[in-house]
Amino acid sequence: MKPFLQKFLLVYSAAVSTALLCFILIGAAKPHASDFDEIRVHRINIVEPDGTLRLVISNKDQLPPVIIKGKEHPEAGEPRPQAGMLFYNDEGSENGGLIFGGRKNEKGEVVDSGGSLSFDKYGEGQIVQLAGVDDKDNQFAGLRVSQGGQRIWIGREAAGTASVSLTDAKGKKRIVMQVASDGTPSLGFFDANGQLVQELTPRK
């Protein structure tokens, strides 16, 4: 091989090797395109490959109304004054969510304060809800399980009473076990009209 050709190949090889090394080092130092320290958005929609909506994460201004099979139905419920996440089933229909909020109105009253995590029955309303609300209109915290009209409530009510309440298929209270704010326990039994028929309390 001629000296000139040997020298050319040597210089060419060195140049290529140097360029490749630089490329590797630069690539290693650069963060992956999908890595972020912070994302600032108003709303995120998670969808399936076919476009079916599965999850919305949103501020309160862009939280959507009830969505059934991909279509918004504002008439199906009141506007929600909270931020949060909404869950959707395989058909793009709402089936639960996590919402939260709280503020003072122009009168200095606390409104829309609290949070709720819920899951819905297919094509119907909530079947499980974990909620805590404490504002000028409502003060309660607890777990509610619903199936038709039947409900189980375990939680704290406005007066500070801790209770477990069981209702029938018509939504009427039938058994209530509670401890009042003063520490007095009781067990109440109710008729089909929701009227108290017997109450058990500790002997004094």
Image: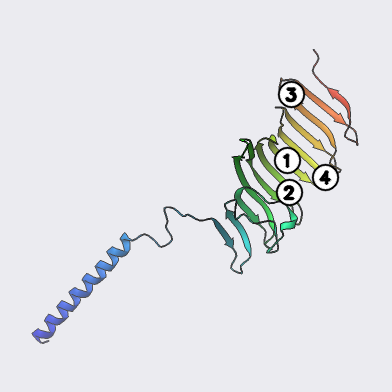
- Residue 88: x %, y % from top left: 66, 57
Task: Kindly identify which residue carries mark 4.
Answer: 149
Residue type, numbered disc 4 = Gly
Residue 180 circle label: 3
Q: Are marks 2 and 3 in contact (CB under 8 Å)?
A: no
Residue type, numbered disc 3 = Ala
Vertical position of residue 163 compared to residue 57: above or below: above
State which quadrant residue 103 falls in.
top right
Mark 1 or mark 3: name the one nearer the start of the chain: 1
Residue 144 circle label: 1
CA separation in Å, label 3 and label 4: 26 Å
Q: Secondary structure at mark 2?
A: strand
Mark 1 or mark 2: name the one nearer the start of the chain: 2
Q: Residues within 10 Å of mark 4 (few under 14, many from 20)?
A: few
Question: Is residue 17 toward the left or the right of residue 76 in the image?
Answer: left
Mark 4 or mark 2: name the one nearer the start of the chain: 2
Residue type, numbered disc 2 = Gln
